């Protein structure tokens, strides 16, 4: 296989991986309504758990410094939004999704962060085209 064929194959696999992760991110863990997390009286809910779905190569311990909410604390939309903005500013990710699972009886909320890595394409080499038009 030529070098450019390998590059195109790698690009194709990378894009397929990203599409797969985007589709799989829409799991049953997500709230029934996209606005449900915005419609709860935040001061009444405690964070039960925070889970992370990370791309390989980025340690979770590096990311936890950018997250301003913790297990056992009262839920704060302000700190959740601040966390997401700070994570985007880190430059590691092209997309960050946060899904919630709300337990109204226990007044708890579980969060799941799903991260998609930024993809950098170093070069695309096309061979065979000598002239156009």
Image: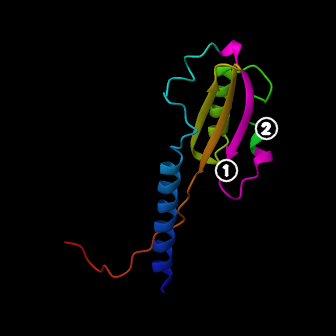
Visual colour scheme: rainbow
* 118 with respect to 66 (left or right): left
Give the magenta-colored segment's residue range. 42-62
x, y percentage for residue 48?
Answer: 74, 29
Q: Quadrant of residue 103?
A: top right
- Asked if residue 61 is among those painted magenta in the image, a careful observer would answer yes
x, y percentage for residue 79?
Answer: 69, 24
x, y percentage for residue 107?
Answer: 69, 19
| Residue occupying image coordinates x 74% and y 43% | 63
Above/below status of 82 relative to 116 = above
Can residue 22 be seen in the rendering of this structure?
A: yes
Residue pointed to by mark 2: 65
Judged from this view, the residue extending furthest toward the bottom is 1
| Residue occupying image coordinates x 65% and y 38% | 112
* 64 with respect to 54 (left or right): right
| Residue occupying image coordinates x 54% and y 31% | 31
Above/below status of 14 relative to 34 = below
Above/below status of 63 relative to 33 = below
Can residue 67 be seen in the rendering of this structure?
A: no
- The answer to which of 18 and 111 lies nearer the viewer is 111
- Asked if residue 11 is among those painted magenta in the image, a careful observer would answer no
Residue pointed to by mark 1: 54
Element type at mark 2: loop
């Amino acid at each position: 296989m030529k070098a450019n064929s390998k590059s195109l194959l790698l690009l194709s696999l990378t894009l397929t991986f990203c599409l797969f992760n985007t589709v799989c991110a829409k799991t049953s863990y997500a709230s029934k309504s996209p606005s449900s997390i915005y419609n709860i009286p935040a001061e009444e809910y405690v964070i039960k758990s925070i889970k992370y779905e990370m791309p390989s190569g980025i340690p979770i311990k590096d990311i936890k410094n950018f997250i301003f909410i913790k297990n056992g604390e009262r839920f704060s939309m302000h700190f959740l939004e601040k966390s997401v903005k700070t994570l985007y500013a880190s430059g590691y990710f092209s997309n960050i999704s946060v899904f919630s699972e709300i337990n109204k009886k226990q007044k708890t909320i579980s969060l799941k962060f799903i991260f998609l890595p930024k993809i950098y394409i170093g070069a695309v080499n096309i061979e065979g085209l000598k002239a156009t038009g």
